[in-house]
Image (tube, grey):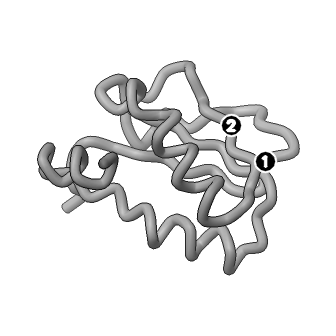
Amino acid sequence: MFIKFMQDLDYDLELERIAKEIKENKAKTVCIQLPEGLKPKATEITDFITKNTRANVFIWLESNFGSCDIPVGLEGIDLLIHFGHSSWE
C-alpha cells in the first residue's frame, strides 16, 4: 500500500535501491533524513528498510532544508540516507 501511495504522489524514493546499498555496504545502523513533506511517512519507509535489510533505522527529526543540510555529529551510524523533493539536475 505504501508503494502505491508514493506512486500516486509521483515520487520514486528508490527503496529497492536503498535496500541494495545497505546490503552491499553491510550497514547495520542507518539514519534516514526526510524533508517535512515526507516525515509523516517515515515509519513506513523505516518498516520497508528494516524488513528488507534487517538494519536498525533511525529517523532524523531535525531540519532538512536541502542537500546542504546534512546532520552533523552522528555517531555509530553506518549509512545516512538523505531524501529530497526535487530532482537534481
- Residue labelled with disc 1: 77
Q: Position of residue 12 (x, y in %)?
A: 26, 58
- Residue labelled with disc 2: 58
Dot 1 falls on a residue whose secondary structure is loop
Image quadrant in which you'd find residue 22 = bottom right
First-in-chain label (2 vs 1) = 2
Mark 2: which amino acid?
Answer: Phe
**Residue at coordinates 60% horizontally, 29% vertically from top-left?**
60
Q: Position of residue 82 (x, y in %)?
A: 49, 47
**Dot 1: within a 10 Å radius of its alpha carbon, few (fewer than 14), some, or many (20 or more) residues?**
some
Which quarter of the rendered picture does the C terminus lie within?
bottom left
Between 41 and 79, which is closer to the camera in this rendering? 41
Q: Position of residue 30 (x, y in %)?
A: 70, 50
**Residue at coordinates 34% horizontally, 56% vertically from top-left?**
13
Image quadrant in which you'd find residue 37 = top left
Cα gap from disc 2 to disc 1, whole angstroms: 9 Å
**Residue at coordinates 40% horizontally, 33% vertically from top-left?**
41
Between 81 and 57, which is closer to the camera in this rendering? 57
Q: Is residue 73 left or right of residue 42?
A: right
Q: Is residue 56 left or right of residue 9?
A: right
